[in-house]
Amino acid sequence: MGTSGPRIAFLHGLFGQGRNWSTIAKALAGPDGTGARCTLVDLPDHGRSPWSEEFSYAGYAASVAATLRAVDEGPWIVVGHSLGGKVAMVLALTDPALVSRLVVVDIAPKDYGDLDRFAGYIREMQSLPLGELRDRADAEARFEESDLGVKAFLLQNLRREGTSWRWQANVQLFADDAAQGEDSLIADWPLPPGSVAPFEGGVLWVAGSESRYIKEADADVMRALFPHVRLLKVKGATHWVHSDAPAVVVEALRRVVQAASR
């Protein structure tokens, strides 16, 4: 989206797709498309991207880097939410020439222990009888998730092919990772302080005030890896900050774009 201006890449979270950032990207590009050039990436094992045989943050970051360089050598502003935020941080730390500025949305560079509630989502997805579904309404009725927003978010991964249904996301890969409990690679953080040089570009760290993904104690390790980080806590927002407060996120990103244009 967009025809001129700084390049921005958007990376979604677990079970998301690039199009989850469409509203934000359209607003940044502006009505005439000159505000920014936005690329909405489907991470590996999501959306239209290929599946992996095993999960790896290094592999995800390398895939994103190759995709972005195929579009433009950069540098890019990279925005990542949750899983995408960790991928964005790994990308900036391992390939800093590609990244001019970084925006990390509601995630910290730490081990979260396990996949927690996402393990429950995975079980719900696996228990949906794909061979019995008549239509999408039937899928929605059978899918046991009380939060309608979460239900819609997860069911965006359901695809019909002829008379059969399949998950577009690599659910089995994520189920295998979730089954590892505290050894989950997705919940883990692969680059502790001291293992890589800090990223010297500007970093905006966006947190939802109602989310529990970012704690005060996370600030020290964040500063160790990203010394030029600024924290923006969005009042009333949950983990899905860009969905809960799109106007706030757009304005924050617009300032990042303006700084990159100077």
Image (cartoon, grey):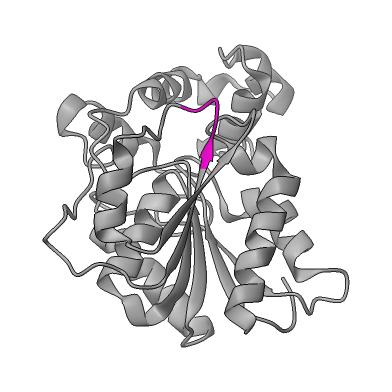
Q: Which residue is at the front of the view, 186 or 257?
A: 257
Q: Secondary structure of the magenta portion, mostly?
A: loop
Does 103 appear above or below 161? Answer: below
Give the residue drawn at x 27%, y 62%: 59
Give the residue drawn at x 47%, y 76%: 68
- What percent of the width, then of the height, locates residue 50? 41, 59
- What percent of the width, then of the height, locates residue 179? 22, 26
Of all residues, the one furthest to the right in this rendering is 31
Give the residue drawn at x 40%, y 35%: 214
Q: To which quarter of the image does residue 176 belong?
A: top left
Give the residue drawn at x 20%, y 25%: 181
What's drawn in magenta, residue-wise? Answer: 207-211
Left or right of 185: which side holds 146?
right
Query: Which image quadrant: the N terminus?
Result: bottom right
The answer to whether residue 249 is seen in the rendering is yes
Does the magenta segment cover residue 48?
Answer: no
Query: Which image quadrant: the C terminus?
Result: bottom right
The answer to whether residue 159 is seen in the rendering is no
Does 239 appear above or below 20? Answer: above
Of all residues, the one furthest to the bottom in this rendering is 73
Q: Which residue is at the front of the view, 205 or 151?
A: 205
- What percent of the width, then of the height, locates residue 173? 30, 40
